Image (tube, helix red, strand yellow):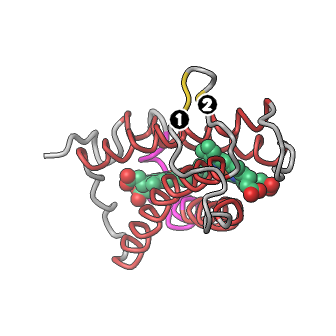
Amino acid sequence: MPERVGAGYTATARTLHWLILALLIVQFVFAWTMPDIKRNTPVTTLIGLHFSFGVLILFVAVIRLAYRASHGEPPPEDGIPPWQATSARILHWLLYLLLFVLPILGWINADWRGMPVSFFGLFEMPKIIATRAPGWNWTGDLHSLLATYALLGLVGLHVLAALYHYFFRRDRVLQRMLPGV
Ligand code: HEM
Ligand code: HEM
C-alpha cells in the first residue's frame, strides 16, 4: 500500500512539488533575460544556466514521477464533486507531461543548433539529434510556445483551483500540499 501521512501528501511529495515550483521560477527568469538565440549565438552564461536548470528540472521530474508511481496520491478530500477530482487528475498529468516534454524539446533544439548542453559544467548531456538535422527546426518555437502559454496557463488554472478550494470551498485541499500543515 502507498505510504501516506494523514490525508495529505507525504513530506517527500510536498518537498518535490515546491522544489519544482522554485526551479521553474528561476528557469523563467533565465529564459526571459537570456539573449535571443539566433543562428550563431554562443552559449553565454545565462543561456548555459537555462540549459543546466532545465536539465535539473528534468532530473527532478524523473525522481518525482518515480516517487508518484510508487507512492500513489492521497484519496480526494471528502465531499469533492467527482468532476473536480477528475479535472484535477487530468490537470496534474498534463503538468507532469510538460515537465518532461519541455526540457526534452529544449535539449533537442539546443542539439539542432549545435549548442553543447552542459550540466553546470560537471558533464555534458549526450546529443539526441545531429546539428541541423533536417525536419527538427520547429522544436525551438514549440518549446518556447509551450513554456509560455501551455505551462504558465495550466499552472495559472492550477493555482486558481487551489485558491478556490481555500477561500470558497474552505476545504483542506491546499493545506495537504503546504509544508508542515
Ligand atoms: C522546464 C524547463 C524549461 C522551461 C520552463 C523553459 C522555458 C523557456 C522559455 C519560456 C523560452 C523562450 C524564451 C524567450 O522568450 O525568448 C525558452 C527558450 C529556449 N530554451 Fe528553454 N526551458 C526549459 C528547459 C530547457 C532546456 C533543458 C533546454 C536545453 C537543454 C532549453 C533550451 C532552450 C532554447 C535553445 C531556447 C530558444 C528556443 C528558440 O528561440 O528557438 N530549455 N525556454
Ligand atoms: C503557487 C503555486 C502552486 C500551488 C498553490 C499549488 C498547489 C497544489 C495543491 C494544493 C496540490 C494538491 C492537489 C490535490 O490534493 O488534489 C497540488 C498538486 C500538484 N501540483 Fe501544484 N501548486 C503550485 C504549483 C505547481 C507547479 C508549478 C507545478 C508543476 C508544473 C505543479 C504540479 C502539481 C502536480 C503534478 C500535482 C499533483 C501531485 C500528485 O498527485 O502527484 N504545481 N498543487
Q: Residue furthest bottom?
A: 83
75 in relation to 33, above or below: below
Q: Secondary structure at mark 2?
A: strand
Does the beta carbon at disc 1 come under 8 Å from ligand 1?
Answer: yes
The residue that disc 2 covers is 118
Q: Is residue 22 magenta?
A: no
- Residues 179 and 87: in front is 87
Q: Is residue 5 above or below residue 111?
A: above
Residue sitting nearer the eye, 110 or 32? 110
Whether residues under marks 2 and 1 lie with C-beta atoms below 8 angstroms apart, the answer is: yes
Q: Where residue 50 appears, x then y in whole percent? A: 70, 39
Span of residues in magenta = 162-178
How busy is the neighbourhood of tag 1: few (under 14 within 10 Å), some, or many (20 plus)? some
Expressed as whole percent of the image width and height from the top left, the position of residue 74 reads 29, 53
Q: Is residue 163 magenta?
A: yes
**Amino acid type, mark 1:** Met
Which numbered disc flags the more N-terminal residue, 2 or 1?
Answer: 2
- What's the residue type where badge 2 is placed? Ser
Q: Is residue 68 left or right of residue 50?
A: left
Residue corresponding to mark 1? 125
Q: Where in the figure is residue 16, as x and y percent of width and height?
A: 45, 38
